[in-house]
Amino acid sequence: MRGMRTTIDIPDELLRRAKSEAALRGRRLKDLVEEGLRLVLEKEQAPAQTAEKSPQPRKGSLHDLMQDLCGIIEDGPSDLATNPKYFDDFGR
């Protein structure tokens, strides 16, 4: 299918990365650009459907996300990173 030709300005670094990705996939740059445009347009067409199907990720740091797991091991050390005995023979 033949489409309309157009000219767009793309930052040099983005164009370099896109050309590299297209080459790694064994595809032409125009095919990669077309695929990206289709993905963006399809995503914008149905944002409500996507939001209903997949749970929203929780925001915050990994520490925030792991708070409910802190202290689940009752008999273990509180922090391996600050206990020097756990570094005995490290790297030998």
Image (spheres, rainbow, N blue to C red):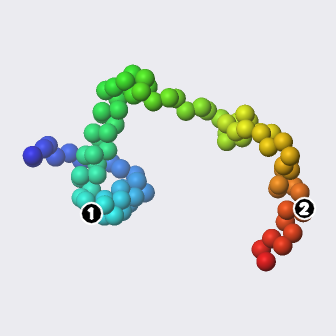
Image x and y of residue 72, in percent: 77, 39
Relative height, residue 90 to residue 64 (above, below) = below
- In the image, what residue type sits under mark 2? Pro
The local crowd at label 2, few if under 14, some if 14 to 19, many if 20 or more residues have their Cα within 10 Å, is few
Relative height, residue 39 to residue 83 (above, below) = above
Q: Nearer the viewer, residue 45 or 57?
A: 57
N-term mark: 1 or 2 = 1
Image x and y of residue 15, in percent: 36, 56
The residue beneath circle 2 is: 84
- In the image, what residue type sits under mark 1? Gly
60 with respect to 88 (left or right): left
Question: Farthest residue in the right direction?
Answer: 84
What residue is rendered at 9% in x and 46% in y? 1
Q: Quadrant of the C terminus?
A: bottom right
Q: Helix, strand or loop at disc 1?
A: loop
What residue is rendered at 24% in x and 53% in y? 30
The residue beneath circle 1 is: 26
Image x and y of residue 14, in percent: 40, 54
Image x and y of residue 17, in percent: 40, 58
